[in-house]
Each structure stands twice: as C-alpha cells, then as structure tokens.
Image (cartoon, coloured by chain):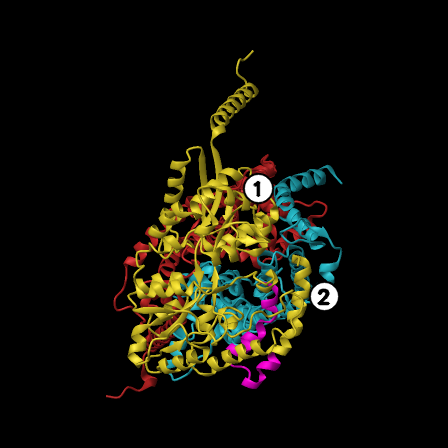
Chain colours: A red, B cyan, C yellow
Amino acid sequence: MRIDPARLSASEQLRRSTRQRRARKLLGHAIIYAVMIALACVFMLPIFWMASTSLKLPRELMAWPPEWIPSNPQWGNYAEAFGKYPLARYMLNSAILVIANIVGALLSVPVIAYGFARFDFPFKNVLFILMLSMMMVPGHIKLIPLYVLYLRLGLIDTYWPLILPSYFGSPFFIFLMTQFMRTIPRELDDAARIDGAGPWGILYRIIIPLCRPALTVVVVFTFLWTWNDFLEPIIFLRDYDSFPISVGLAFFQGRYSIEWHLFMGATLVSIIPILVVYFFAQRHLIGGLAAIGIKG
Amino acid sequence: MTTQERRDAKTGYLALSPWMVGFVVFYAFPIIATIYFSFNEWTLAEPPTWVGLDNYVRMFTRDPLFVSSLRATTLFVIISLPTKLVLGLMLALLLNLKIPGMNAFRTIFFIPAVISGVAVSLMWIWFLNPDTGVVNTLLSYFGIRGPLWFWDLHWALPSVAIMSIWKVGGAAIIYLAGLQNIPAHLYEAAEIDGASKWSRFWRITLPLLTPTLFFQLIIELIDAFKIFTEAYVITHGGPLKSTYFFLYYFYEEAFRNANMGYASALALFLLVVILSATVFVVRTSKGWVYYEN
Amino acid sequence: MKLLNGTRILVLVSLLLMLMLSIGSAGAQDTVTLTWWTTSGRDSPEPAIRNVIAAFEAEHPHIKVDVSIMAEGAYNDLMSTAIAAGEGVPDLAWYWSNNWLPQALDITDRLDNDPDISRDIFHTEYFNNWVVWNDMVIALPYDIGANFVMYNKDVFDDEGVPYPTADWTPEDYIEIAKALRNEDKRRWGGDRPRGPFRALWRNMGATNPYSDDSTTVEGYINGPESVAAYTWLWDLVDSGATPTPADLEVLGTEGTGPVDLFIAGRLGMATLNPGSMVSTLEAGVNFGVVPEPRVPGNENWVHGWALRAGIWKNSEHPDEAWEFLKFWNGPPGQRILMEQGLGHFPPIPSLLAEYEHADTEWYQGFLTVLDATQTASWRKDHPCWRGAVIRGVRDAWDLIMLGEIERDEVQATLDAMVEPGQAALDECVPRLGG
C-alpha cells in the first residue's frame, strides 16, 4: 500500500520533520567532531612525536625508517630522567614559587585595579598607559640592574627575586582586572557606602567576590608564567636543590650532546600540572578573559 | 577640587602605590640604566666610558647587521601576526560550538601554549628535522621531498612563524571569551529577521569582537617583535641572516660579544619601535574597533 | 608600667640576634667559604662534583666550598651578568669566554712556586693555548676538547671500503664519503665541517680569515688557500654524500656534532669530540678514530679546546681559592672526575694513560690526534674572530652549505665577504684592544 504524502496526519509529519532535524543535527555534530579530531591530531602531532621519542633508545633516535610507535618502548627512560636530576624536587620548587606568586598577584592586582577602575585622579590615564607600555620591555635589559639590586639587598640565592615582582602587580593582570571591575555596576558600591562601608570595605566585601572569573585568569596565567620562567631563576638562584623545573629541564642539554629521549619525557611530565589546572579552571577562565573586550 | 574628589584621589593613589613602587624598582630603574649605558662604550674588561652618540651613529649609519635584523624581525611580524589573528579566530569559532566534550578539545588546543620556550624549540628541531622529522616523513609517503625547514633559505622564517602559529590556542581562548560575551538576544533577533549564518558573523560577531581583536593584536604585536628563543636555540640567525631577529642580535652583542653599550642602544631602539607600532595601532583603532555601548 | 611592650621586645630580639651573629662569625673566623660556579653534565655528574669537593674539604678543614651546579645553558648569561655588574662574581668560575679573561687572577707565581703542582704535568698544547694569556697564567685547563673523525667500522665493512688512516687527504675524505653513501639505507658517507678556519682549513694552508696583526681581511679570507678550502667544501656538498646542514647545524650545538646520526649507523664518518666516544661506546657501535685529513706537506692541526677554571681577580680569598683550584684541576680532583664522570678526559697525560679503555685501538687513535698543533682561539688570532668577524663573513659559508652558488663563484663570493669582514674587524679590534 502506497502512502499518499498529502494524507499523512499532522502528527506524523511533525514526527518526520523532527526526525529529519535530529538526523541533520547528528550529521552536523559528526562533521564537527571529524573536523575537530582531525585538527586536534595535527596540533598534537609534535606532542605525539615527543612522546614517541621519549620511549626510544639513543641509537633509535635517528634510525631510518623512523618508528611512529617504538616497538620496544623504554619506559625506563622516565625513571632514568627523574633519577639523573632531582626533577621531582624541582617540580615541588616550582609549585612553591607558583603559590607564592599567586598569593602576591591576588593581593596586589585587585587593589591596583580598584584604583584605576573606581577613582579619578590627576594623571590617571598617563599612568595607565605607562603601565601598559611596560609589557614591551624585553626581559633581558632588566637583568644587570636587578642583579646589582638583589645582591646589595642580600636576596641572591633566595626565592624573593622570583616572587617580589608579583606583589607589585603585573601590567597584563592589572589591565584585565581594571576592565573587569568596570563591568560591575557602581550602584552596588553606592548601596554599600550608604550602609557605611569605606572604600576598602567596598573592595573586599562587594567587588572582589564578584571578580572571581578575573581572579581565575590571574591564578592560571601566574601559574603558567611562573612555571615556565627560565631567565630569572638562572640569574638569581644558585643552589642545585632550589631550581624550578624550567631550569631542571635545561640540564639535559649538555656541553657535547643533548639527551633527547630523557629531555622529551621530562618535558611531557612537566606540563601535566598546568594542564590539570587549566582543565578545571577553564569555565571561569573564559568568563574572566571576556573583560578584555569591554571598553576601557 | 571638592573634599570628595580629594579623598577619591587619595584613595586612588594609595591603591596604585604598590604598582608605583614596583614600576620604579622593576622598570624605571633598569630602563634609566639602559639609557645611560647606551651612551657608553662598555666591554666587560673595563668600566663604561662615555662616548656620546657614537653607538647611535653607528647603528643608523654603518651597521649592516642592524639592517638585517630589523628586516628579519619586521618580516616575521608581517607573516605571523595576521595569520595568527585569523587562525586564532577561526579556531575560537570552532571551539565555541555547543557540542558535548568541547572542554576536552579546548584543553587539547591549549597544550601548545603551555610548553615553555626552550622546550618548544627543541621539540620543533626534532619535529621539523628534514631527515627523520615527522613532517618530511609524512611527505615522503606521498613521494614529496620536503624542504630543509629551519635551514632552508626560503623556509627558515616561515618555519619559525609556523611554530608560533602552533601556539594559537592561547589566543583562541581569549577570542572564545569575547565570543561568549556577545549577548544571545542579538543572534536571536537576527535569526528572526532571517539573516544567514554568514551575515550574522559579519554583522554581529565580528563587530562585537573587535575590542578583543584589538587587545590581542597589541599583545601579539609586542610578542612578535620580541621574538628571540627560536633564533637562540634553533637557527642562530641563519641561513643568510633570514632569522637574525633583533632581540637575538641584542643578545649576541650583550651576552656573547661583551658589547654592552651598543647592545643597550639596540634594546632602546627596539623599545621605541614597539612603542611606535603600538601607538600606530591604537590610533587606527578608533576607525575599526566597535564598542557596544 | 608594662615590662615588655612591643618596642622593648623588638630591641631585645635584635640584640639577641646580633649576639648570636657575632658569636657565629667569631667561631667561623678560621673557616673560609669559597664560592664556585660549575656546570653539570655527563662528563661531570653532580655526585662526582660533590665527591671532589668532599675530598678537598677533608684535606682542608678550614676551607668550605659553596658550589653552585648549573645547567649548561644558564652559565653564559649568569656569568656575563655578574661580570657586567662587577660584583657577585664567584671566587672560582669557568672562564670560557675570551671576553671574561681580564677578570681572572694572574696565577703565574702561585703555579710556579707551588711544590704540589707544576705546569709540566699538563698537556703542553692545552696549557699553552688555553690558560696562558698575555704571558700570564690566568687559569688551569680542565678537560680535553678536540675534533677528530670517528668512523663506523661496520659501515666501512658493509661497503667494502678500507678504514681511513692518519695520512689521508681532504680529497680522500670526499672519495670515501661517496663510496660509503647508500641511498637504500638512507646512509651518508661523512659529515661536513662545522666552521671555517678550524683544523681542516689550516690543514689546507688557510690559517686565518685576516692578517696576523688583525688589521686586514683582503687577501686572507679571499686568498688562494682560503679559496681552495672553500672550494673543497663546495665539492663535498656537491658530492651528495653528506647530510644537510639542517642535520648538522640544527641538531648539534657548537661542538656537538651529528652524534645521534652516527650512532644510528646512518653516517659512516663524523667529526666528533671525546664525549661522543663514550656515547658511541655505550650504544655498542664498533668505531675507530683518525685525525682530520690534511694536504701532504702542510702542518698537522687539530681543532682543540679546554674548559678553564680560574680565580676572580677581586676574590677575597685568593690563597684558599688557589688551594681548591689546584686540587680540582690537578691530579687528585681530575682522577675522581675521570673515574666517576662519563667521558671526562683530563689534560694531564699521566692520567690519560690510566683511562679504563686505554688499551683500545680507538683510544690510542684519540691520543695520536692530540699530538697535532692546536687551532687555539687566540694564537695569532684576535678575540674578534669568534664573535664579530665570523658573523660578518658567515654568508659565504651559508651559500656554499646550501648549494646556492656554482663552483666558479666561490672566489667572487669570498671577495664579497671582504667588506663586511673588514667592517666587523674595524669595529671590534679598537673596542677589545689590539
């Protein structure tokens, strides 16, 4: 029996179109997934190669044809890398530095941003531009003057030179936080003021609790930058046991050879903490970064 | 000034005071020292001696390496900056799609942005090795003989640019934040008006994203001019000075050739270049950056 | 009146602190602490460094050595920064850049009047070329760096090519490389030199890119010997028997060389260094060692270098620093490092003879290489060469390595380098002094 389309019931038609729509949606998803997975593969190729290299023997590193997945994976390379240099200790040191820097950034950035976002005073715009332009200064030119300074203060071979700057605010974060605070309605300040709160009470009781997304950005990026900083630790630290992981990885690059297989494995392990933090902070992070697009 | 204004100013300055102290110690002091050194000849053997404008005269009149390094750096900025902006935006549009499991993808694309500079460079040496590297191995399956990449006259600079583009996930996160900030009701209204996806992108998404683009443009402009690690670890400026970046030249003069005075002049020049480029972008921004309110 | 208010507590605590500090320093008066910056690597692993220091401190109870062990990549930046700052330079350090030499203490008299050590125990070439500067002894040589050709015997046997001998010529090198080249196995015959005017250049009679008095480039960089050497390089590149510069220059930092390619059995001959011998041995490769080839009749040269440890001229404890220096670089320390480090070769012939693989053929080949005259960075040579001038004339090197010019264009290409080379020399020599 043939069905005349015209005689289909309304509900049947509706069901069909829903099914079609769902099918189209599924197809759309499938295409998106295919594209995303393909792109992810391309992006992950260098990482994959790193992982593959980390499991090879020195004589297999440049063998032809190259093996994509080592037939004889050397898991012992990881133990060797971590046994050769105190990398676990270095990761712990990095974690200490990260925490100290995060505390510094969280203490300083909201206060400074509060000044820029909520108060008017002479030269405010000049100072704001001056602050932003400090992002352009190449790190190398600061080394010699700061070396002399820290030496005179007796802070060489302590963590202070790697921590202190965070307690005075970093331009990127100040900018971001200022933008974010500007999105918080001033009416909230006024209401609190009527209730008798002073300017600092407003900051700590009203504004900071609302800034959580922007604070997440500060936490994640401070983590990232501190974890990866190389130039300053090598100039200001001396003790073999005090280095952060970024410096520890450099030990694999010797005078006469690079221990490629050990280096690759150690690098892979070293990025895991950042990725874990990033994965969990992601949702808030995006909310915080959104402040960038707000008129300043 | 009213009392209220005075009190505001006082609180404002008080709030800014940590930054001002930091500015003086961590920025102003080193920059002033650099300015002073740039008027000196300073080899490590002896203390600095005042030479007036000599370093600047040499820089602008008879230093072929100054020209080479400026050219290489500018070319790098021109190649990498627009590519990274466009690809970052495209990636962000993809990552903004509402499908399950997107968080995992967002993390995956962010991975390249979290590995530190030296490690990334060493990894890419391995990855783009013309002989056993992945890319040329893959190309060889199709019978294509890949270039020498970092040691190819024409590919060295693009190779460095590709490396920096690989880290586009960092920028994409910022665009993503901008995208999620666009009010949904604008899209709903446009959909009711029957606007196509394409026209919705050009008429709503892009204009509302210009502030984010503007910010990212400036950040990446600064970063691109400061390109250094790739030349330091991988190419040493070669071949034929095609990757002889400005900051690498500065580094060689200051930390390898003990020519601190001249290096200081170079560093200041770079600072002025970045500053001018940024001011230029900011000036043009009034024409293309759109704020919703 | 309260007995203890805040101010009083503060005063009391600080008084106590001062008392403790003064007691501490009074007790420490006899003990001197030396600062010493070193790097760690395969040749000097961290435990070996600590063992040398422990042995020293056991012998000298009144001296403590505060060692900072750093990554190789960190050392240059840190030391340059400290020297530029003019303070915070350690009592003992590596003076590996020529630019740092004026900061090192003249130890000539100490060395010559010390009964425990004498300059005669050191390898003459390494001593004269690396630690004698302006007629002063400014450091002690620490290790043996040298370039020589390592060949993979299995590859030679595979292709039925006889092993190279010490009297081979640059032309032989190209011919052997061609004979070893094997497309199917993706195997190359030999590598390319990693810098001009090293041993191979000198073996062909081209001594320097400029005149001995460091004034003139014309006629040196583009002189007949230099043109002949660069043309030889052109022929080598043209032979197709060598890996690309991407394999040689990118994978190896200065002095490293393509050791990974060699170990993988994909490079028949490679110009490597003492450290590579140990890597190769560990990987189980059957190899031999010969000097770099030379034109018959020319003097035999080797590209050699040594790390040198010196005392800072402003050190407050030069006597104690000298005690440590002669221990570390002399036989006691060097023996520990040779036995506990991988591939550490002391520039002390009597110790070299005690090496655990001393009776092998490759080790004997290595010792023969060391007999040649050394290309040292400042013998007839200005420090400007390494930095400024080599950078000015680098383009000629790049063009040949990439096969961008024809064989008859070598002369013209070198002629074109005279101007930038001379400019670099003119800028650099007055600055660093003649």
Residues indicated by labels 2 and 1 sit on the same polypeptide chain: no
The subunit carrying tag 1 is A
Q: Amino acid at mark 1?
A: Tyr
* Predominant SS of the magenta segment: helix
Residue under pointer 2: B60
**Image side of residue C278 versus residue A110, left or right:** left
Residue under pointer 1: A150
Viewer-nearest residue: A229 or C115: C115
- SS at mark 2 in the image: helix
- SS at mark 1 in the image: helix
Viewer-nearest residue: B208 or C349: C349
> How far across and down, in percent of the image, does residue B183 sit?
53, 62
Circle 1 residues within 10 Å: few <14, some 14–19, many ≥20: some
Range shown magenta: C387-413
Q: Is residue C405 magenta?
A: yes
Q: Amino acid at mark 2?
A: Phe
Circle 2 residues within 10 Å: few <14, some 14–19, many ≥20: few
> How far across and down, in percent of the image, does residue B194 sit?
52, 75
- Quadrant where the C terminus of chain C sits is bottom right
